[in-house]
Image (cartoon, grey):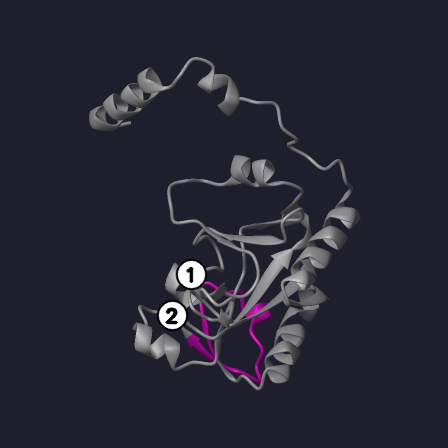
Amino acid sequence: MSDARSVILERIRAAAPPGARNLVEADYRRTLGLDRGELVALFAARIVEYDVGVRYATCAELATTLARAAAEHHAHRFAIPADLPTAWRPRELALVRDRALTNAELDGLDGAITGSALAIAETGTIVLDCGPAQGRRALTLIPDLHLCVVFADSIVGTVPEAVDRISVDRPITFVSGPSATSDIELTRVRGVHGPRRLEVVIAQR
């Protein structure tokens, strides 16, 4: 930790009112106590509430399942991380490896295919950390459609469980459904800060 950061944090601690530390360290639920099947079912139920498509596949079925999802969205040209596993790559699709594609080039494609770091059942959230098979953040923020592979054994119950597993040495993105926002008149608009459409494939290793 840098000296400047240490000084700032120490000043914040000194300025905190008595008892504030106890509030931060309050005892809260860290696990749901569910088995693997229950976690997968809860995660699927939560993301459906966000209008996310959900599919299931084995590793051997991933390419076929992703191709089917793309076809249902009439999408053909996809950006992929350079390290996306070969077994995931549908032969029916035009796949463009992301080797520093410009924002305009990403925007001109139909979507992106990536993996994920983990997922949170309680909130229906996908966590991306720019790790293996995920690529950089722009890859999942600019194209209109995101096809995301989530492994069943990477689904945790709660946010604290996810935070315990996340490394903070690279950018982290929490995704709970397609990008959407509402204006002052409560008109819901999709695609403002990311893809308008999200499809999740829950895979068994």
Q: Is residue 114 visible?
A: yes
The C terminus is located in which quarter? bottom right
The kind of residue on which mark 2 rests is Asp
Q: Nearer the viewer, residue 185 or 146?
A: 185
In the image, which disc is placed on residue 118? none
94 falls in the magenta region: yes
Q: Which residue is mark 1?
A: 135
Q: Outermost residue toward the top?
A: 18
Say which label, 2 or 1, has the lower sequence index.
2
Q: Residue at x 32, y 16 (%)?
A: 14
Q: Which residues are magenta?
A: 78-96
Q: Which residue shows up at 41% across the image and 40% down it?
A: 168
| Image position of 25 with respect to 122: above or below | above
Label 2, secondary structure: give it. Answer: loop
* Residue that mark 2 sits on: 98
Dot 1: element: loop
Identity of the residue furthest to the left in this view: 4
The quarter holding residue 44 reads: bottom right
Evaluate if marks 2 and 1 touch, with contact meaning CB atoms under 8 Å apart: yes
Residue 34 drawn at (x, y percent): 77, 40
Query: In the image shown, does 107 or 89 lie closer to the viewer?
Result: 107
Taking 137 as reference, is 14 above or below it? above
Give the camera-side residue of 107 and 184: 184
* Coordinates of residue 116 in the picture (x, y in percent): 54, 56
Left/right of residue 181 with respect to residue 124 in the rendered view: left
Residue at 67 percent of width and 42 percent of height: 157
Quadrant assignment, res 61? bottom right
Q: In the visual, does 193 lie left or right of 124?
A: left
Left or right: where does residue 161 sit relative to residue 57? left
